[in-house]
């Protein structure tokens, strides 16, 4: 080996990008040390294998057909691929594959260079998610503001009509009684009452007396419902200033239920068992809204998926809170499909999802766990049984300690055990 060849070999071995060299049929002839570190496969395990050993399934056959067609035509291929490592965890890489030709201009080999960008992709996804949430928050705040004013005067006018109708009914009844009492002749009194009753029947007075009162009551209930939704939207969309403040977990849950009602009302009944004596905790209220919303939507989807395969009509979601050892415990339990054993270790991984395309990005639980563990120094776990359902357990410290060491200790000692409901009922 010449000095130049030795230098080239050392450069290839020491470069940070993973390099794969294959023959014309795609059989691996060489991988460098960076490939071993990235993939988890040793050089001996990779040699004579096909690079498809790395396929994660995220890209379909059509993707690879186009790639190989381009390479067969002698073109350099550039793209982004999600592969899986030996331990089946997924990484994302920018890939360049170049055909190598001999003196007769025949393709005899391919060289692939992979640069891992998993972290960059995660940051990009989180940024996009944050921008989307910010946009939704601004939209919700604007809608809430626009709805609030007309709802206020509709509510005020309806209350006035209800009160006026009650007074009008009293007036009619009083006039009827007063006139009847003022007529001394029994014959005249009977004649007046007959005429008055005839007019009441002609205008359907008894029907209006009953139905108008009920209509006003139902209208006011609807107005109050819209007002509560508007209030919840404003609260939900209110941005955090980055500083922790005291907040009531039960109130955050109630707001989330109001905002997300349309996500679960057709498939599940929600039961809440909230500790009324729960202390306020140090938190970023808006971030916890996001976590609870994600868990609620996931529970509804799991139940919906189960209902589609059974004769059951509705499922159930149970939300509980309690205080335990200087922490607040929150649980979300559903009787949905449960999580399959092979999926459980990947639940909190970025981009992992078992939902159909368009129903999930695989970021929700990863972001939720980051908010609970990294931002609030709490803990998040789950228990599950296939066909029975899943419970997500969140443990949050009541007080955030000023020092990082105290915070780390709080996260470590926070054991997300189920609440003992007997103490809180």
Image: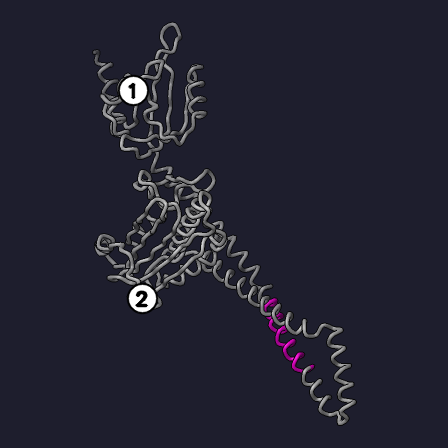
Position of 188 relative to 78 (above/below):
below
What residue would you read off at disc 2?
424
The answer to which of 218 and 352 lies nearer the viewer is: 218
**Residue at the outermost top position:** 104
| Residue 131 visible (yes or no) | no
The answer to which of 366 and 177 lies nearer the viewer is: 177
For marks 2 and 1 on the same chain, the one whose residue lies earlier in the sequence: 1
Assess whether residue 159 is covered by the magenta stretch: yes
**With 144 as the anchor, is 425 left or right in this view?**
left
Q: Which element is circle 1 on?
A: loop
Position of 359 relative to 11 (above/below):
below
What residue would you read off at disc 1?
49
Q: At which x and y percent is residue 242?
A: 37, 55
Say which quadrant the C terminus sits in: bottom left
Magenta residues, start to end: 153-172
Q: At which x and y percent is residue 284?
A: 36, 57
Count of marks overlaid on the render: 2
Mostly what secondary structure, the magenta segment?
A: helix
Residue lying at 36% horizontally and 48% vertically, measured from the top left: 388
């Amino acid at each position: 080996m010449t000095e130049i060849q030795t230098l080239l070999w050392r450069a290839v071995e020491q470069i940070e990008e993973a390099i794969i060299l294959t023959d014309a049929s795609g059989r691996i002839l060489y991988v460098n040390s960076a490939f071993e570190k990235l993939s988890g496969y040793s050089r001996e395990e990779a040699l004579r294998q096909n690079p498809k050993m790395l396929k994660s399934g995220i890209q379909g056959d059509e993707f690879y057909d186009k790639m190989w067609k381009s390479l067969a035509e002698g073109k350099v291929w550039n793209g982004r691929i999600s592969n899986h490592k030996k331990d089946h965890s997924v990484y994302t890489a920018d890939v360049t594959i170049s055909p190598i030709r001999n003196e007769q201009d025949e393709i005899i080999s391919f060289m692939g260079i992979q640069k891992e960008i998993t972290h960059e992709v995660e940051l990009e996804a989180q940024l996009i998610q944050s921008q989307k949430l910010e946009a939704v928050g601004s939209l919700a705040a604007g809608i809430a503001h626009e709805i609030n004013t007309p709802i206020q005067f509709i509510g005020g006018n309806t209350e006035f009509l209800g009160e006026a109708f009650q007074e009008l009914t009293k007036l009619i009844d009083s006039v009827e009684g007063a006139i009847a009492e003022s007529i001394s002749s029994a014959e005249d009194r009977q004649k007046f009452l007959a005429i008055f009753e005839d007019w009441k029947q002609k205008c359907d007075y008894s029907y209006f007396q009953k139905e108008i009162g009920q209509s006003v009551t139902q209208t006011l209930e609807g107005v109050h419902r819209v007002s509560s939704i508007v209030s919840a939207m404003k609260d939900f969309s209110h941005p955090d200033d980055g500083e922790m403040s005291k907040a009531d977990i039960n109130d955050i849950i109630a707001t989330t239920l109001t905002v997300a009602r349309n996500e679960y009302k057709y498939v599940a009944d929600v039961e809440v068992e909230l500790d009324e004596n729960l202390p306020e905790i140090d938190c970023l209220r808006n971030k916890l809204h996001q976590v609870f919303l994600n868990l609620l939507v996931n529970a509804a989807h799991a139940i919906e998926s189960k209902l589609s395969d059974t004769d059951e009509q509705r499922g159930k979601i149970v939300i509980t809170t309690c205080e335990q050892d200087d922490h607040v415990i929150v649980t979300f339990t559903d009787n949905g499909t449960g999580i399959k054993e092979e999926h459980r270790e990947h639940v909190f991984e970025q981009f992992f999802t078992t939902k159909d395309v368009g129903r999930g990005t695989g970021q929700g639980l990863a972001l939720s766990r980051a908010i609970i563990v990294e931002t609030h120094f709490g803990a998040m776990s789950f228990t599950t049984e296939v066909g029975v359902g899943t419970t997500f357990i969140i443990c949050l410290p009541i007080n955030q300690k000023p020092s990082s060491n105290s915070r780390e200790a709080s996260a470590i000692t926070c054991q997300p055990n189920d609440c003992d409901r007997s103490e809180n009922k």
